[in-house]
Amino acid sequence: MFLDTANLNEMAELLPLGIFYGVTTNPLLLERAKVPCSHHALQDLAATAFALGSKEFMCQTWGTKVDELVDNGIRLANLDSRVVVKVPLTFAGIEAASMMSNLGIRVCTTACYSPHQVITSVSAGAEYVAPYLGRMNDAGRDGMQSVVDMQKIVDGMRSKTRVLVASIRDADQLAVLAARGCNTFTISPKVARLLTEDELTMDAATDFAKVEEGGFGSS
Ligand code: G3P
């Protein structure tokens, strides 16, 4: 799992749980966290994520033309070998993704809405492809089925590209997708907090504590 945030406080709160492999960001998350979309700011954010134990940091390149996307992507990739460069699956983005992966840059194609875009991503040499589950559902599509189909596509193609499911809105969606074969997720801090909650676990922990307070288990 990855933590989907650009907020330093949320990273400091949740990365110590030890359940996240890395951190993912995008321009909207940067704006929400009031972090400028600049190389310098992303370098600082990545350094914080790594210091808190993150093994990968994903951030999105920007620009409308292929050369802008590639130039910014190269600069981001040069920050650290653990940086993965996200690029939206537009026509220019696909060309930029292919060029960057040919240069040995680690790429995550993003804003994926249709299973066929996974085939494009595999062919462009992306290490990850990120479908937006919640936004597919918001648009009236069957996001769960599409994401399961995407995973089947990479499995069927025997590709190393990982389907990184994003825009997950609750803990149940995560569990259902994992049970149906998906294995890589990025989740918001809100969903991350839901993963630490189950009222029956809390009841059991309270019962354990009462017994411990009563003197059993200690001399
Ligand atoms: O990483 C995708 C995310 O930023 C979008 O999530 O919940 O706003 O659709 P959401």
Image (cartoon, rainbow, N blue to C red):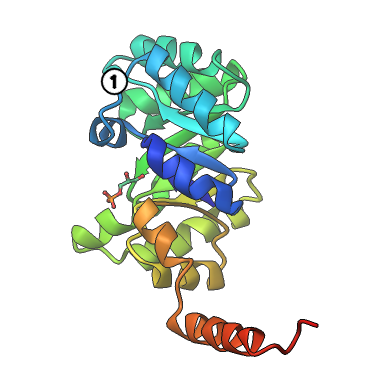
Q: Position of residue 152 (x, y in %)?
A: 54, 61
The residue that appears at 32% across and 61% down in the rendered structure is 169
Q: Dot 1 lies on which element?
A: loop
Q: In front: 1, or 114?
A: 1
Is 76 rendered above or below residue 170? Answer: above
Q: Position of residue 204 (x, y in %)?
A: 55, 86
Report the residue at 38% width, 60% height from top: 191
Q: Residues within 10 Å of mark 1 (few under 14, many from 20)?
A: few
Query: Is residue 213 depicted above or below 178 in this figure?
Result: below
- Res. 141 in view: yes
Total label count? 1
Using the rendered image of the protein, determine whether residue 124 is visible from the camera's viewpoint: no
* Disc 1 within 8 angstroms of ligand 1 (CB): no
Percent coordinates x, y for residue 202 in the rendering: 49, 80
Estimate the x, y position of residue 74 in percent, counting from the top left. 49, 13
Residue denoted by label 1: 36
Say whether residue 190 is left or right of residue 105. left
Q: Three-letter amino acid code at disc 1?
A: Pro
52, 99: nearer the viewer: 52
Q: Quadrant of the C terminus?
A: bottom right
Q: Specify whether 94 is left or right of 31.
A: right
- Left or right: residue 167 compared with residue 207: left
Q: Residue at x 55, y 13 (%)?
A: 78
- Which residue lies most toward the right here? 219
